[in-house]
Amino acid sequence: MFNPISYTKTFCMTKLFLIPIASLLLAACSDNDKKEDDASKKNADMQALYEKNLAGLKKSISAFENKDIEGWAANIADTARWDSPAYGDTVHTKAHWKESLAYYLANWDNLKLNNSTFLPGIDSATHDLDGSVRYYGNWDATHKSGLKTSVNFYGTYDFNTDNKIISGSEFFDVGGLMNAVTPKK
């Protein structure tokens, strides 16, 4: 038989349990929304930083294509560390990087980066954008001997707060390129 007093007590007890649970759920959702907003803002900030750094890297590439070594150097921090693609090269300074590039400028004409793909770098632990820039492409040119060359290239670069490169690691077949342009005996 239906007892209205018992029903009211059960209904009130149910409300007492549901209200705190609902409150906890709302608070949890609210925290998740804040975390998502913070993550979204951080991602937007890092995307903007990547775009600035990318612009600096593209300036360096353009200067190199135009045989403007000083223009290239203007986008590199004085304390930059460079990891050369050449086997056994253990010098990591900006001066050595500049000297190496000057060799290519002196021995090749029509330097041009083709088929390039620029990508944002990511933090290896969190996989979040970190402001660094990497790219793949083909460097095409004409050696002073008249031989046309093309090398596949990959480079990755980190930047300081002034959007200057502070470290660069570059990869291409230096030995193969040198073998191709060395006169055969």
Image: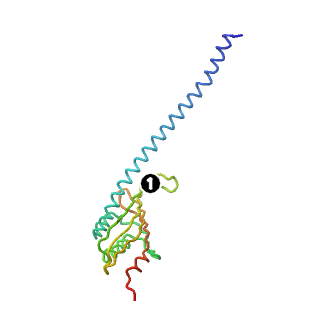
Residue that badge 1 annotates: 130
Q: Is residue 2 above or below residue 127?
A: above
Occupied quadrant, residue 98: bottom left
Occupied quadrant, residue 107: bottom left
Q: Secondary structure at mark 1?
A: strand
Give the x, y percent position of residue 35. 49, 41
Q: Which residue is found at the position 47% from the left and 51% from the top? A: 128
Work out whether residue 164 or residue 51 is closer to the camera in this orientation and state it: 51
Q: How many labels were placed on the picture?
A: 1
- Amino acid type at mark 1: Asp
Work out whether residue 142 or residue 51 is closer to the camera in this orientation and state it: 142
Q: Is residue 4 above or below residue 171?
A: above
Q: Which residue is found at the position 40% from the left and 61% from the top? A: 135
Q: Is residue 46 above or below residue 170?
A: above
Q: Quadrant of the N terminus?
A: top right
Occupied quadrant, residue 17: top right
Give the x, y percent position of residue 45. 40, 48
Give the x, y percent position of residue 50. 39, 54
Colouring convention used in this rendered image of the protein = rainbow
Which residue is the extreme one toward the right? 1
Label 1: how many Cα within 10 Å (few below 14, some 14–19, many 20+): many
Q: Quadrant of the C terminus?
A: bottom left
Which residue is the extreme one toward the bottom? 185
Give the x, y percent position of residue 101. 35, 72
**Seen in the image, is 95 located left or right of residue 21?**
left
Q: Is residue 40 above or below residue 111?
A: above
